[in-house]
Image (cartoon, rainbow, N blue to C red):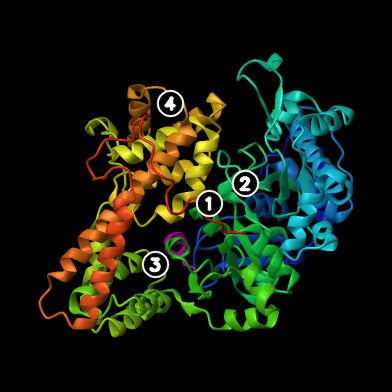
Amino acid sequence: MRIPVQISKETIEQVLSATDIVELVQSYLPLKRAGAQFRANCPFHNEKTPSFYVNPARQSFHCFGCGKGGDAISFVREYENLPFTDALGKLAQRAGVQIVEEAHDPSAERARRSRGRLLDLHREAAEFLHGLLIKSPDAGHAREYLKSRGLGSEVASGWSLGWMPDRAPVFLDWARERKFTGRELVDSGLCYLREEQRASSGLRVRFRDRLMFPIRNEVGDVIAFSGRQLREDPNSGKYVNSPETVLFRKSRVLFALDRARKPVLREKAALLCEGQLDVIACHEAGIDHALAPLGTAFTRDHASLLRRYTHEVIVCYDADRAGLAATERVFRELAPEGLAVRVVAMPDGHDPDSFIRTHGADAFRALLKQAEGFFDFKLAKAAADGLLADAAGRASALGDCAGSLALMSDFASRENQINVVSARLQTSANTLRQAIARQRSKPTRASAVPDDEASAPPTEPTPLHRVVAFCCQLALASGEARDFLAEQFETLHEALPWLEGIPLLESILAAAPDPASPASVNAFLAALPDADRLALTADAMAAAPIDDPVKSAEQTLALLSGIVLQRRNAAVKAALKEPGLDHQRMFELLEEAKELRTLLQGMEQRIEFDDELPKSTWRPKPPPWRGRRRDG
């Protein structure tokens, strides 16, 4: 382990001497005694048989599976993804040891001070905005909104909820009084420049008239904010999150993980909700192992983060079509990490927040106890929708389940689920295994690169359907358009799987590079695989400027709505031609066909898969999901 020159060797030794590594590691994950040592499943890679050992005599840890090891500082660095000085500082504070500096590395010192200032800014801003929510006469509507959600001042204080005024000078004057610079406000993401690259152009506050949720890292530091709209504004997303900063990476942060870490260890499961208000409602009801991603995207990084604390995740998303699609995508991120997934069947029209307010905490606990395994839930839903009534439907479900089973990295769990699925679909386990093998043989985005890259043919751009390419262009051109697309993405997932390039669009919405910052966009592009980067840069070079990105996003969503309706209409027509239909089934199909015709006639033009993108003169009616309320 290299020791930075600015920290004295004596200080490091003092911190390590004052830290019991067994006690330290046990504060993160459960250990079991194994002779003179302690062991656990490794938090740094996926395993079922424990190979992670902590040696109290040597005050060290080592994993015989992945090879990671070291002292207490190394453990904190690896576990919390911290630089050396931050990990040392965390342990020093824990042990009551004062850091003594020996020499200074100017660049490292500047970075450390800058990070410290940003943490101070976020902490003090959270306190200031909370004070406004509680005391400001202008925040009455924000307090009324909280009251309508059953949240009083005690809950608001416990979660440090705040209110950002509509008038920007209120916040900017406070920041100047607290001696925070314009550069720090921009670096924090709380503000942005009116004109990029022109510091003299003035600052704009990113959040205006919003209920503010402080976002904390695993150790409880405020590192970002999520702001909920308090007045309906069609030109702005219901939720706006801080952009990515040196403190905040949305794909690596889960709301309330700082509170839920120990409860998740206790319950041996994490309860995954969709929104912040759902999580708060759960915690206030004593269900304190609840947490949520920020925005709509649950990523592989989130799955890796949860695997440090548990081997099971209970998904508690809305029961509507969008919520079911989101649950499916969560499974696709959790399964490769070896995590078991159970699903709570929420009653129609309810999320955890509304269910607890209506029926109480005990009823919600009873609902959690009824959570089913992912495939039990998936097939029960398919059966209830009549999708398993014939051989063709069961064959389609088998292919769908095979794709999901192929993602599971845990062999024993996969074999168990193969038996469950094959029994429900009235087929043999071997038939299902063959389908899984076919899925696994398909090339993936993670395919290995040939050893001799020089001899490889030139990289071809990732194929993008023009609708997807246009959405990617919008997401990289406008933060508001990107947030709008992200908010509606789950609802659209029924249409999107058939369009080429959806994983790339999802990665843009998840990473959320700041369109106002070329450096942010370029950093995002640089991290992409070559094929994806070529596709986006080629599309951007060929594209004309977009006058109104948000309106264009709305028009594109309407186009995709047409795709959904027409695909379903074609499926109904095909079903009506099947021989041997009974009268009841024919009546149901005719009624659905009538409803689909009405919806299609309500659109201003008929949209086919091969139609052009919406033109600026095209003004469709708002899509049917416009204004959908997830958190109320």
Q: Which amino acid lies under the numbered mark 3 shown in the image of this protein?
A: Met
Q: Which amino acid lies under the numbered mark 1 shown in the image of this protein?
A: Gly
- Where residue 566 appears, as percent x and y from the top left, is 26, 54
SS assignment at label 4: loop
- Of labels 1 and 2, earlier in sequence is 2
Can residue 161 be seen here? The reply is no
Q: Residue furthest left?
A: 579
Q: Which residue position holds label 3?
A: 408
Is residue 181 placed above or below 258 in the rendered structure? above
Q: Are marks 3 and 1 in contact (CB under 8 Å)?
A: no
Q: Which residue position holds label 4?
A: 546
Q: Which residue position holds label 2?
A: 232
Residue range of the region highlighted in magenta in the rendering? 326-339
What whole-number distance in Å separates the C-alpha atoms at marks 4 and 1? 24 Å
Q: Nearer the viewer, residue 584 or 78?
A: 584
- Where residue 460 appears, as percent x and y from the top left, is 26, 34
- Of labels 3 and 1, earlier in sequence is 3
Q: Are marks 1 and 2 in contact (CB under 8 Å)?
A: yes
Q: Which residue position holds label 1?
A: 627
What whole-number distance in Å separates the C-alpha atoms at marks 3 and 1? 36 Å
- Of labels 4 and 3, earlier in sequence is 3
Residue 1 counted in the magenta span:
no
Q: Residues within 10 Å of mark 1 (few under 14, many from 20)?
A: some
What whole-number distance in Å separates the C-alpha atoms at marks 2 and 3? 42 Å
Residue name at image x 40 percent, y 39 percent? 555
Q: Residues within 10 Å of mark 4 (few under 14, many from 20)?
A: some
Q: Are marks 2 and 3 in contact (CB under 8 Å)?
A: no
Q: Is residue 592 left or right of residue 237?
A: left
